[in-house]
Image: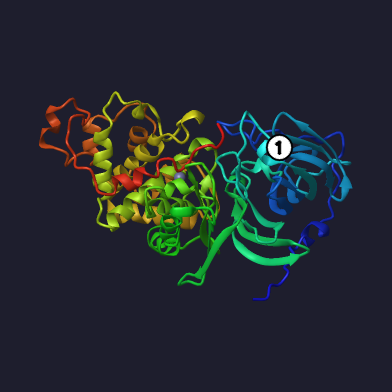
């Protein structure tokens, strides 16, 4: 196959006759974008449209170096601005002119351009950098997972700091070209489509393109020795999966799961509407972690997800995120339910389709499983707090909330909501409350009390509220006689329970 070199068009920036900002009016951009859980993440004063990363990585030494070209537009008159980054920087240019720069805190790169940047004006930042990402600790950890034959960047919410400078928050999504040179015989896996591979003087360069908006934590890079499989979906989407050559006896189970990505995505398209991206796949690197992550178009799976055998449920979870989490993403990390509640509910729907337990049975069982005094109920999925962002309650209670919504509005409206939200809002950013308003609009029903009960109350919804939402209703005729919270009620365990909960470590943070 012949590959064509595709040069990104940066012409737009040159055509604008910008009025220079006056030095007196220009002010520094904020060092954080304003997230309620992570005030220092992301930055203010500009919006990125594209990242072009041209890198080189040596697995033997874990040395990563290269150049990032960031296309952005100022949203205020800027005297100075920050990027989030933790590796060593050797040079920064803004608009082709050398800029002053300084590392601030543990993940801020403060850049002072030679002249202020006018609000509304596009500008280009070039950052030359290098480092050993596994050795760079921020807050005591690194998200760069070192493997026997390379390294991997995949974590949430912190991942980008160790491999490219960025406006590191989902509020600022952008397109990407990621081109990485690695020693011949080694592969570099990233998001989107593989545009070209070229070899020269012992190095092979892999160039990837993500043409739809992508959050920084959903950008991924994996270098190592992989077995790569490719295919095309019925709709003509290119599928590319990659499996570390070091998976050993677990390779079969990993492949038997991830090779079903195209089938799962086709099924999810029937539930959530058209697949939002132009490529598909998954990768399983040789990492010691246990989590999986919905890195855009190409989810990351730790081998441990398949340690007890194949698990298609985790593939369903990560691919469901392509609609809920990736295409439609959160405004603030507080809104994590918009990602996780739906990805877990997709696992329940898959179980229902496979005849291994309906979503209703899974909701009833989950509700009955946790007695009122269980700390599970103290976590509010709609605002869990940074320490509980990936708590089981965000997933399980979050999915019960969706079953409660389904029972309240009926299947027709519920599945219209599930499909319309990611279709109408593709590539946008939304909050839990935005979803509530949307569901009210589609169903014509007031849903405030329902959302408050299931997502925003730090205690177990009692039997009357559960009955009203159709949760635990079939549990037992004696439910009325019990403590009123479903405790002591016997509900049969759905067959899919084990596979779904084998994915409970789907998100986690590396190295801490
Ligand atoms: Zn998830």
| Residue at point 46%, 36% (across, down) | 390
Badge 1: residue crowd in 10 Å (few <14, some 14–19, many ≥20)? many
Relative to 58, residue 28 above or below: above
Q: How is the image coloured?
A: rainbow
Query: Disc 1 marks which residue?
Result: 86
Residue 414 position, x and y percent, is 33, 52
Residue 424 position, x and y percent, is 48, 56
Question: Considering depth in this image, is 193 or 134 the residue closer to the camera?
Answer: 134
The number of numbered badges drawn on the structure is 1
Which quadrant holds residue 411? bottom left
Relative to 246, residue 464 above or below: above
| Residue at point 87%, 39% (across, down) | 22
In which quadrant is the C terminus drawn? top right
| Residue at point 42%, 62% (across, down) | 260
Question: Considering depth in this image, is 237 or 323 the residue closer to the camera?
Answer: 237
Question: Considering depth in this image, is 364 or 73 the residue closer to the camera?
Answer: 364
Image side of residue 272 versus residue 168, left or right: left
Residue at the extreme top of the image, as rendered: 373
Residue 421 visible in the shown view: no
In which quadrant is the N terminus drawn? bottom right
Residue 403 position, x and y percent, is 30, 45
Residue 355 position, x and y percent, is 25, 56
Residue 154 visible in the shown view: yes
Mark 1, secondary structure of its residue:
loop
- Asked if ligand 1 lies within 8 A of label 1, the reply is no
Which quadrant of the frame does ligand 1 lie within? top left
Residue at the extreme bottom of the image, as rendered: 1
Image side of residue 258 versus residue 201, left or right: left
Which quadrant holds residue 504? top left
Image side of residue 454 versus residue 328, left or right: left
């Amino acid at each position: 196959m012949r590959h064509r070199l595709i040069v990104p068009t940066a012409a737009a920036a040159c055509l604008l006759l910008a009025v220079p900002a006056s030095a007196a009016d220009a002010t520094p951009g904020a060092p954080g974008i304003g997230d309620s859980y992570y005030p220092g993440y992301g930055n203010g004063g500009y919006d990125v449209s594209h990242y072009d990363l041209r890198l080189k990585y040596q697995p033997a030494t874990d040395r990563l170096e290269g150049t990032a070209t960031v296309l952005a537009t100022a949203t205020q008159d800027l005297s100075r601005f920050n990027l989030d980054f933790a590796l060593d920087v050797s040079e920064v240019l803004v608009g082709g002119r050398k800029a002053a720069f300084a590392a601030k805190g543990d993940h801020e790169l403060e850049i002072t351009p030679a002249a202020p940047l006018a609000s509304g004006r596009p500008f280009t930042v070039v950052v030359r950098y290098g480092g050993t990402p596994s050795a760079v600790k921020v807050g005591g950890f690194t998200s760069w997972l070192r493997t026997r034959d390379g390294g991997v960047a995949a974590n949430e919410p912190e991942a980008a700091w160790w491999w490219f400078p960025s406006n590191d928050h989902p509020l600022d999504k952008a397109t990407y070209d990621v081109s990485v040179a690695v020693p011949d015989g080694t592969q570099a896996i990233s998001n989107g489509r593989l545009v070209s591979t070229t070899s020269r003087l012992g190095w092979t360069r892999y160039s990837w393109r993500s043409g739809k908006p992508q959050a920084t934590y959903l950008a991924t890079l994996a270098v190592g020795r992989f077995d790569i499989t490719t295919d095309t979906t019925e709709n003509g989407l290119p599928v590319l999966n990659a499996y570390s050559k070091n998976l050993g006896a677990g390779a079969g189970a990993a492949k038997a799961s991830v090779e079903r990505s195209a089938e799962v995505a086709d099924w999810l398209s029937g539930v959530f509407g058209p697949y939002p991206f132009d490529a598909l796949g998954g990768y399983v690197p040789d990492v010691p972690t246990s989590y999986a992550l919905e890195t855009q178009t190409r989810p990351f799976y730790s081998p441990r997800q398949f340690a007890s055998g194949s698990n298609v449920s985790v593939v369903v979870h990560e691919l469901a995120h392509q609609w809920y989490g990736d295409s439609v993403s959160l405004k603030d990390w507080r809104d994590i339910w918009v990602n996780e509640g739906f990805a877990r509910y997709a696992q329940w729907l898959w179980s229902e389709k496979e005849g291994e337990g309906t979503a209703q049975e899974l909701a009833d069982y989950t509700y009955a499983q946790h007695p009122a005094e269980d700390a599970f109920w103290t976590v509010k999925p709609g605002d869990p707090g940074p320490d509980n962002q990936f708590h089981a309650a965000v997933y399980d209670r979050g999915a019960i909330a969706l079953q409660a919504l389904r029972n309240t509005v009926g299947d027709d409206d519920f599945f219209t909501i599930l499909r319309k939200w990611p279709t109408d809002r593709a590539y946008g950013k939304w909050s839990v409350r935005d979803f509530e308003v949307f569901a009210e609009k589609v169903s014509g029903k007031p849903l405030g009390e329902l959302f408050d009960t299931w997502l925003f109350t730090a205690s177990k919804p009692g039997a009357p509220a559960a009955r009203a939402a159709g949760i635990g209703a079939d549990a037992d005729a004696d439910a009325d006689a019990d403590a009123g919270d479903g405790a002591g009620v016997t509900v049969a365990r759905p067959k899919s329970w084990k596979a779904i909960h084998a994915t409970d470590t789907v998100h986690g943070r590396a190295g801490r």
